[in-house]
Image: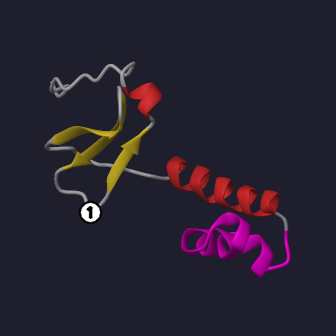
């Protein structure tokens, strides 16, 4: 599964399926498995700062929410439909 998922990062899922003589559904299952595993085993540690930007990508009110964490080498895109409904508590929770 990891093999197909890695190729699916480089090619479209359709191209990956055609290149390895498999179905689009098998590529989807491989990517879903790897993403689920990654999300389940991710640790963020202590977050010192968080940044949020909304980028308009079409006319009207269509935005892409971009979240970045200071001190981490990765950023996260948020689902634009869910981004406006998320409550974030940035208070220090240490005793």
Local packing at callout 1 (Cα closer than 10 Å; few below 14, some 14-19, many 20+) is few
Q: Position of residue 34 (x, y in %)?
A: 62, 59
Q: Position of residue 69 (x, y in %)?
A: 22, 48
- Residue at (21% x, 44% y) in the render: 47
Bounds of the magenta segment: 1-22
- Residue at (70% x, 73% y) in the render: 15
Quadrant of the image for the N terminus? bottom right
Q: Say above or below: 50 vs 88.
A: below
Q: Say above or below: 36 vs 78.
A: below
Q: Residue furthest front?
A: 59
Is residue 88 inside the magenta stretch?
A: no
> Is label 1 in a helix, a strand or a loop?
loop
- Residue at (45% x, 36% y) in the render: 79
Pick the front one: 24 or 31: 24
Pick the front one: 49 or 60: 60
Q: Say above or below: 84 vs 72.
A: above
Horizontally, residue 56 falls left or right of residue 36, namely: left
Q: Which residue is mark 1?
A: 73
Is residue 9 inside the magenta stretch?
A: yes
- Residue at (67% x, 76% y) in the render: 3
Pick the front one: 13 or 49: 13
Per the picture, the main secondary structure of the magenta-coloured stretch is helix
Quadrant of the image for the C terminus? top left
Horizontally, residue 50 falls left or right of residue 6, namely: left
Pick the front one: 70 or 19: 19
Query: Which image quarter: residue 26?
Result: bottom right
Q: Say above or below: 24 vs 76.
A: below
Horizontally, residue 63 falls left or right of residue 6, namely: left
Q: Position of residue 55 (x, y in %)?
A: 27, 40
Q: Residue furthest bottom?
A: 19
């Amino acid at each position: 599964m990891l093999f197909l998922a890695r190729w699916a990062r480089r090619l479209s899922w359709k191209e990956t399926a055609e290149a390895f003589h498999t179905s689009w559904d098998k590529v989807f299952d491989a990517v879903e498995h790897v993403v689920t595993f990654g999300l389940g085993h991710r640790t963020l540690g202590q977050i010192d700062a968080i940044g949020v930007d909304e980028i308009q990508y079409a006319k009207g009110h269509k935005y892409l929410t971009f979240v970045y964490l200071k001190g981490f080498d990765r950023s996260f895109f948020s689902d634009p439909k869910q981004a406006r409904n998320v409550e974030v508590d940035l208070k220090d929770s240490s005793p």
